[in-house]
Amino acid sequence: MTATPPPIQAPSAKEKKYDRQLRLWAASGQRALEESHILLIISPEGSGSSVAGVETLKNLVLPSIGQFTILDAATVTEADLGINFFLEAGSFGKSRAEESVRLLEELNPDVKGHAISQKLEKWIEPNCLAPYDLIFLGGPASDAGWQICDIARSQSKPLIYLYSVGFYSTFSVQLPGDFPIVDTHPDPESTQDLRLLAPWPELLAQVPSKIDDLDHHDHGHIPYILLLLYYLGIWKETHGKYPESFKEKSAFRDIVRGGTRYDNPDGGEENFDEAVAAVLKTITPPTIPSSVREVFARCPKDDSSFWIIASAVKTFCDRHGVLPLPGSLPDMKSRSVDYIKLQNIYKTKARQDVAEVTASVYSAEKGKNIRVVEIENFCKNAAHIKVIDGTSLPDIREKSTAQKVINGCGDDESLISIFLAFLAIEHASTSEGVLDQASKACGAPEKVVPERIDNAISELRRAGGGELHNIAAMTGGMIAQEAIKIITKQYVPVDNTCIFDGIKSKTEVFRL
């Protein structure tokens, strides 16, 4: 009697609600979002970039961050009603923080909002940032605002400084000293590691001994991976080594192409076409990228899970000379049963490598509480891990920042002029004053002020410190995107300053 297969479990209401974003950052990223608490601090000056800040929160409330808090001592004015969609006529004269929180919460009942209507300088104290995972600071920042930046830096809290006026906006990301990212979401093709020049016994066992005796159907359905291994074996017997140079690989490719049958009903074979196309990108020895070696050189940095796993993977590499096998297999012309068998061989080898790394992780004193799924994810993405060297917010008084600013002034297409204009407005200075400060910091001769810097300052002053909703909304979308990268620790965030010119519809990123 045939057993009844188990019923297929339908997606939950939550999975249906967040289906699209789960495809982007998976359940682990969604869990990180839902456990996060974000703080938005709005400057008391002008609109205080309140619209850009609230628009950023909108784009984080919708995908369901856990909690958010708005710290804003201002009350709603007529000017606010004209630019902030998260205020209404009845909000006039009320707390801007409380009204924004109330209307933002309507977007998603799963998210809890909080309002603090206290002045920043009275609220600030050494542990004030403890409950929060990410801080947004709206510009122009007061002295208390810059103090918040210092506290965030000392407590390894990521912070984003945002400033929006008129048609221009800018934001800078301040990350902790070392910010590791495991899942950088590289191009899928770059994650394939087939190990054709370092095959293991179970894989070699699948290579057919003779393919000339096969009928047309079987010959045309040999997975191209096995075709390449078959011809690599023949090449090695003849030459004593695998093809290395481009000339040798081209000759090898011609041999593979020569095995194609054209007297079959299809007039050709798709699996051989796939094998020929894959020669140059797959017939390479497995290597450890230099960026990964740089990460390994820092091990052990601390006792966080990332560095414990990194140390274990380094041990694996020292022992075997290769990274753990990712285990993924590309699509190819093949019979389903053969593809599944080949897929299982790769997955089994990947699981064996993960098991070896896991044993090393659990041998560490503080590694026993690390989840296996975290180790699996690290091993799968080991070739593309990244550690960003976090920086403080740009300071034009620092030599390296000043030098980059001076160099940018020589490029007529650079948006660095807008960045300098924001600095001049924020510090009640002039273009000459800002450039003089940069020149002194890096020891460069004083430069003639480009006209475009004065034009940018004039444009900001024309706006009177106010925001335009469409520019603020655009800026909020960009900042929310970077915030999601930081919270989920997936993809690679901006490092470290982004400038947006709403007149030219142009953005530019600088590391300042």
Image (cartoon, rainbow, N blue to C red):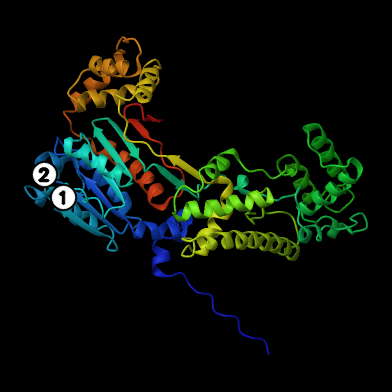
Residue 489 location (% of width, % of height): 43, 50
Residue marked by disc 1: 97
Asked if the residues shown at circle 1 and circle 2 are in contact, with their CB atoms under 8 angstroms apart, the answer is yes
Q: Residues within 10 Å of mark 1 (few under 14, many from 20)?
A: many
CA gap, disc 1 and disc 2: 8 Å
Residue 123 is left or right of residue 56, and the answer is left
Taking depth in this image into account, of 466 and 364 the one nearest to the observer is 364
Q: Which mark is residue 74?
A: 2
Q: Tell me what residue is drawn at x 71 percent, y 54 percent.
A: 332
Identify which residue, 76 or 487, lies in the foreground: 487
Give the percent coordinates (x, y) of residue 480: 34, 46
Nearest the viewer among 263 and 103 is: 103
Q: How many marks?
A: 2
Q: Secondary structure at mark 2?
A: loop
Q: Seen in the image, is 353 located left or right of residue 99?
A: right
Identify the residue shown where x is 9% and y is 41%. 78
The correct choice, above or below, for 357 with respect to 79 in the image is: below
